[in-house]
Image (spheres, coloured by chain):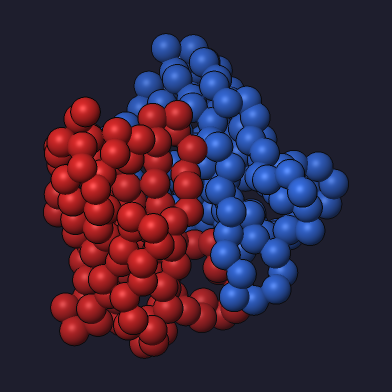
Chain colours: A red, B blue
Amino acid sequence: AQKVTQAQTEISVVEKEDVTLDCVYETRDTTYYLFWYKQPPSGELVFLIRRNSFDEQNEISGRYSWNFQKSTSSFNFTITASQVVDSAVYFCALRPGNAGGTSYGKLTFGQGTILTVHP
Amino acid sequence: NAGVMQNPRHLVRRRGQEARLRCSPMKGHSHVYWYRQLPEEGLKFMVYLQKENIIDESGMPKERFSAEFPKEGPSILRIQQVVRGDSAAYFCASSPQELNTEAFFGQGTRLTVV
């Protein structure tokens, strides 16, 4: 069975602070994909990143960076110099790398972390 | 190329009524997934469909819920005799036939049962 745990229910920071959102996962699959999604107050899901289990290189995209550590089954997300517009719920998710070649949309989501950035 | 379209965006139903949620996948996508997001929770997988077939309904409640994806037209998630506990956001995602291509999510339908 697959499981994603986001232990931080809510985080509150002041603008320009750096913030890290934790994600720990469990899976028996040798190949899998990890994701982060953002859900702003408007409610839609915004795709942020997908990471293959074979690729442990950290990734940076502007103010966003991701730290994937297979040894600790973690895929943490850091926002540098946070802004008010970063306020949202952030979800970490997991899916098998090869679910019979069909279930590429079947993800297991964490509970989400509510990030509030104060001006 | 329009994204995944869900309608309505907001739906209010009285207890006992039926709710029909529609999802039009992206052009060229033949796989559809439905998720439910209960208040203050993450998304939970409900059902995976291909055209005219239910592939995986392991997350669907056994009663009152059904889903279809006909040869023509949108995918429909149908909830009969709604109860207050059905109030949630329902998201649809679609993906193409090609392997190793991610699913794209719609904006969701927020169902409120009063």
Q: Residue at the spot x=21%, y=28% of the render?
A: A119
The vertical placement of B15 against A117, above or below, is above
The location of residue A4, given as percent across then percent down, is 27, 62
- Identify the image quadrant of residue A94: bottom left
Front-most of A62 and A10? A62
The location of residue A97, given as percent across then percent down, is 47, 79
**Residue projecting furthest to the right:** B72
Q: Residue at the spot x=33%, y=55% of the render?
A: A63
- The C terminus of chain B lies in quadrant: top left
Q: Residue at the spot x=79%, y=58% of the render?
A: B28
- Identify the image quadrant of residue A102: bottom right
Front-most of B58 and A79? A79
The location of residue A109, given as percent across then percent down, is 35, 56
Is residue A9 among the parts visible in the rendering? no
The vertical placement of B6 against A47, above or below, is above
Q: Residue at the spot x=72%, y=50% of the render?
A: B26
Front-most of A47 and B17? A47
Does residue B46 appear left or right of residue A71 in this picture? Answer: right
Does residue A104 appear left or right of residue A57 in this picture? Answer: right
